[in-house]
Image (tube, helix red, strand yellow):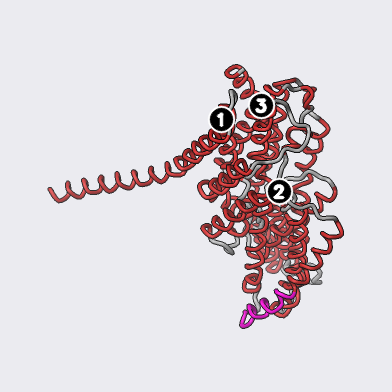
C-alpha cells in the first residue's frame, strides 16, 4: 500500500518536472525576443539625443519587433521547400537562412524608404510631427498583423502589411488625399499577378524536367546531360538576380553587363556541374526517387541565395520606416529624396530577422514546405528557381510583386501540375470501351473499376484545399487589416504624444 502511494507521489513529481520544463521552453523564445527589443531600444538611446530622442528609442523597439516577425514569417518561403523535400534539416535550414539573411541585410540592405515615404503618400499634405507618429503606427500595425499571421500559420507578404499600415495611418493622419491611390491600385493588382506568375513558372520548369529526365527510360543518362544544363541556367539567373536586386544598394550595373554576367556564370555553372553530376550518378539506381537526389545541392544553394536576396531587399520592411523616423527627427523635415540606412539601423533589422527565424520560424517553414503539397528535391528546386526567375522578369517589366506570393504560388503550381498528371494517368488506365462483345461480368468489373478510379481520383487531390483557401484569405485581408489597425494606433499615439 505504501509502495503504491510512493509511486503515485513520484509520478506527480515527474509530471510537475515535465510541465515545468515545457513551460520554460515555451517562455524561452518570447524571453529572448524581449531581451533583443530592450537591447535595440538601449542601443538607439546611445546613438541619438535631443528633446524627441525618446520617440527614436520607442521606434527602435517597434522596428526590432517588426524584424522578428519578418524573420518568423517571410523567410519560411525561401527555406520551406528545402525542408519539406528533406534536402535540409530544420536546424541546417535555420543556420543557413540566418547567416544568408543577415549577410544580405548588412552587405546589401535594400532601401524602400522612398517608396514608403514618397510613392505611397503625398508628403506635402503631412507635417513632420504627424509623419513620425504615422510611421510608428504603420510599423507597429504591420508587425502585429504579421505576428498574428505567423501564429495561425499563414505566410503573408510583409511588404503588403507595411503598405497597408502606411495607407491606413496616412488616411487617419491627413485624409484620403494624402494617399497616392494609383500606386495602391498597382500593388493590389500584384496580389493576383504574383502567385499566378510563380505557379506558372514552377509548373513549366517541373514539366520540362519531367519530359527531359524523369519520364525517360534511362533516367540517369538523361540526368547527366540535363542537370548540368539546368544548373547552368540557375547559376546565370542568380548571377543576374544578385546583380540587379541583391546588390542594388551598393552596385548598379548596366543591362549589357548584367547579361554578360549571366552568360559567364552560366558557363561556369555548367563546367562545375558536369563532373559533379557524373560523380554523384555513379551507381545510382534508374529510379525517379534516386535521380531527384542530384538536385539536392543545387536546391540548397538556391535557397541560400534566395535568403541573401531576401535579406538585402526586405530588411527595409522592418527598418525602412524607422530610418524615415530617424531622418525626419534629426533634420526637422521630411526628406523628398532617398533616405540612406545607417549601419546601426541595418544591424537591428539583420539581427532581428535572424533571431525571429531561429525562434519562431520552424512552424511556418513546415506549413510552406509540408502542409500545402508533398515536395521532393526536384519540385522544391522548381519552386526556388521559379521565384528568382519571376522576380527578375517582374522587375524588368516594372511590376511590384511579392516574393511571398511568388514562392507560395510556385508550390501551388507544382501541386496542381502533379494533380493533372495523376488524373491523366488514371484516365489512361481505364478499361477499353471499344470491345465488340462485353459480357455482364466484364460490365460489372468495369463499373467497379470506374468507382475505384473515382475514389482514387479524390485521393489524388495533391494540394490541400483548406490551406489554399486559408492562405488566400490571409493575402486578401493583409492590406485592409493592417490599414485599419494602423489608423487606430495612430489615433491612440496622437492622443498620447500629440
Q: Secondary structure at mark 3?
A: helix
486 within the magenta span: no
| Magenta-colored span | 271-284
Local crowd size for mark 1, using a 10 Å CA cut-off: few (<14), some (14–19), many (≥20) = some
When asked about the image quadrant of residue 122, the answer is top right
Taking the spot 75% from the left edge, 31% from the top edge, the residue there is 335
* Residue 325 appears in the figure: yes
For the residue pair 428 and 6, the one nearer the viewer reads as: 6
**Residue of label 3:** 132
Check contact, mark 1 vs mark 2: CB within 8 A. Answer: no
User: Disc 2 designates what residue?
Assistant: 403
Sequence-first disc among 2 and 3: 3
Q: Is residue 282 magenta?
A: yes
**Residue that badge 1 annotates:** 58
**Predominant secondary structure in magenta?**
helix
Q: Are marks 3 and 1 in contact (CB under 8 Å)?
A: no
**Residue 404 position in % (x across, y down):** 68, 47
Question: 274 above or below 140?
Answer: below
Query: Rounded to the nearest whole Å, what is the CA distance between mark 2 and mark 3?
Result: 28 Å
Amino acid at each position: 500500500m505504501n509502495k503504491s502511494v510512493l509511486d503515485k507521489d513520484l509520478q506527480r513529481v515527474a509530471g510537475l518536472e515535465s510541465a515545468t520544463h515545457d513551460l520554460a521552453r515555451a517562455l524561452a523564445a518570447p524571453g529572448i525576443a524581449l531581451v533583443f527589443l530592450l537591447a535595440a531600444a538601449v542601443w538607439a538611446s546611445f546613438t541619438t539625443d535631443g528633446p524627441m530622442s525618446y520617440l527614436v528609442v520607442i521606434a527602435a523597439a517597434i522596428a526590432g519587433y517588426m524584424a522578428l516577425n519578418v524573420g518568423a514569417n517571410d523567410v519560411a518561403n525561401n527555406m520551406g521547400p528545402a525542408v519539406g523535400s528533406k534536402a535540409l534539416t530544420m536546424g541546417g535550414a535555420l543556420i543557413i537562412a540566418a547567416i544568408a539573411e543577415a549577410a544580405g541585410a548588412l552587405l546589401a540592405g535594400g532601401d524602400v524608404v522612398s517608396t514608403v515615404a514618397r510613392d505611397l503618400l503625398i508628403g506635402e499634405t503631412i507635417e513632420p510631427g504627424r509623419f513620425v507618429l504615422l510611421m510608428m503606427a504603420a510599423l507597429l500595425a504591420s508587425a502585429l498583423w504579421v505576428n498574428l499571421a505567423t501564429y495561425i500559420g499563414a505566410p503573408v507578404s510583409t511588404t503588403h502589411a507595411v503598405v497597408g499600415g502606411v495607407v491606413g495611418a496616412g488616411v487617419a493622419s491627413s485624409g484620403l488625399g494624402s494617399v497616392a491611390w494609383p500606386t495602391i491600385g498597382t500593388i493590389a493588382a500584384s496580389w493576383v499577378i504574383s502567385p499566378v506568375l510563380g505557379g506558372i513558372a514552377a509548373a513549366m520548369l517541373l514539366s520540362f524536367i519531367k519530359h527531359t529526365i524523369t519520364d525517360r527510360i534511362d533516367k540517369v543518362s538523361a540526368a547527366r546531360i540535363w542537370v548540368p544544363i539546368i544548373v547552368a541556367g540557375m547559376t546565370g539567373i542568380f548571377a543576374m538576380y544578385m546583380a540587379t536586386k541583391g546588390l542594388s544598394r551598393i552596385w548598379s550595373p548596366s543591362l549589357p553587363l548584367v547579361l554578360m554576367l549571366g552568360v559567364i556564370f552560366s558557363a561556369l555553372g555548367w563546367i562545375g556541374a558536369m563532373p559533379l553530376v557524373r560523380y554523384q550518378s555513379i551507381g545510382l539506381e534508374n529510379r525517379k526517387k534516386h535521380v531527384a537526389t542530384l538536385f539536392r545541392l543545387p536546391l540548397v544553394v538556391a535557397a541560400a541565395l534566395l535568403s541573401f536576396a531576401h535579406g538585402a531587399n526586405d530588411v527595409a520592411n522592418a527598418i525602412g520606416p524607422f530610418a524615415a523616423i530617424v531622418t525626419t527627427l534629426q533634420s526637422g523635415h521630411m526628406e523628398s529624396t532617398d533616405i540612406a540606412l545607417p549601419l546601426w539601423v541595418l544591424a537591428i533589422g539583420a539581427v532581428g530577422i535572424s533571431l525571429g527565424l531561429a525562434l519562431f520560424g520552424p512552424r511556418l517553414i513546415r506549413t510552406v514546405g509540408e502542409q500545402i503539397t508533398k515536395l521532393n528535391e526536384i519540385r522544391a528546386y522548381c519552386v526556388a528557381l521559379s521565384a528568382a526567375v519571376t522576380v527578375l522578369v517582374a522587375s524588368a517589366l516594372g511590376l511590384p510583386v511579392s516574393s511571398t506570393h511568388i514562392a507560395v504560388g510556385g508550390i501551388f503550381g507544382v501541386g496542381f501540375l502533379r494533380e493533372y498528371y495523376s488524373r491523366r494517368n488514371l484516365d489512361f488506365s481505364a478499361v477499353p470501351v471499344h470491345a465488340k462483345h462485353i459480357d455482364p461480368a466484364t460490365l460489372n468489373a468495369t463499373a467497379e473499376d470506374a468507382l475505384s478510379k473515382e475514389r482514387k481520383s479524390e485521393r489524388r487531390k495533391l494540394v490541400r484545399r483548406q490551406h489554399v483557401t486559408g492562405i488566400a484569405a490571409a493575402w486578401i485581408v493583409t492590406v485592409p487589416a493592417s490599414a485599419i489597425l494602423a489608423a487606430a494606433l495612430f489615433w491612440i499615439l496622437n492622443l498620447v504624444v500629440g
